[in-house]
Amino acid sequence: MAKASEAIFSLRPVSFRYKKEVDPTSLLSCGLIAEEVAEVDPDLVTPDRDGKPETVRYEAVNAMLLNEFLKEHQKVQQLEANDAEQQKEIKALVTTVKEQAAQIQKVNAQLELNKAAPQTVADNQ
């Protein structure tokens, strides 16, 4: 399916009510408008006798959705793997920084000890 499923990004979901002669209860429905879907991808609709879009082939739309979901899932798994690797690298860097800070403290302490004691000039008068 590769990139073919990306057509679903151009689809516009809508809410609507069927005409009373089609559905007497006229409950609110959600879906796609066949004419709009046909403009995006004619293979996603079933035409009527005159060749005009009549119904959306939701099973095909669902397969496309699944394909896009799987592609995104794979990206998420890769991002999670990258995150785990970066967390390991961050821990290693923090350890290195702490070790270097300790070494700097040791060197500073040694420098303090090695400073020459202040010399005073004797007053021989």
Image: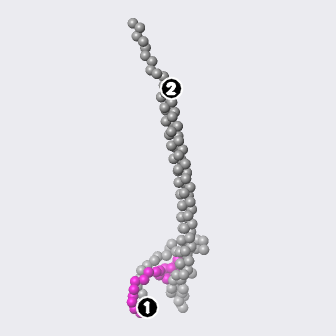
Residue drawn at the location 45% of the way across and 77% of the way down: 13
Residue named by callout 1:
22
Q: Quadrant of residue 44?
A: bottom right
The answer to whether residue 106 shows anywhere in this view is yes
Q: Is residue 56 left or right of residue 124?
A: right
Q: Please tell me how crowded label 1 is: few (under 14), some (14-19), or many (20+) other residues with Cα within 10 Å.
A: few
Count of residue discs: 2
Q: Residue furthest right?
A: 1
Residue named by callout 2:
114
Q: Residue furthest top?
A: 125
Of the numbered discs 1 and 2, the one sitting upstream in the chain is 1
Q: Find the magenta span and give its range.
A: 20-41
Report helix, strand or loop for mark 1: loop
| Magenta-drawn stretch contains 39 | yes
Amino acid at dot 1: Val
Q: Quadrant of residue 71?
A: bottom right
The answer to whether residue 41 shows anywhere in this view is no
Q: Is residue 17 left or right of residue 89?
A: left
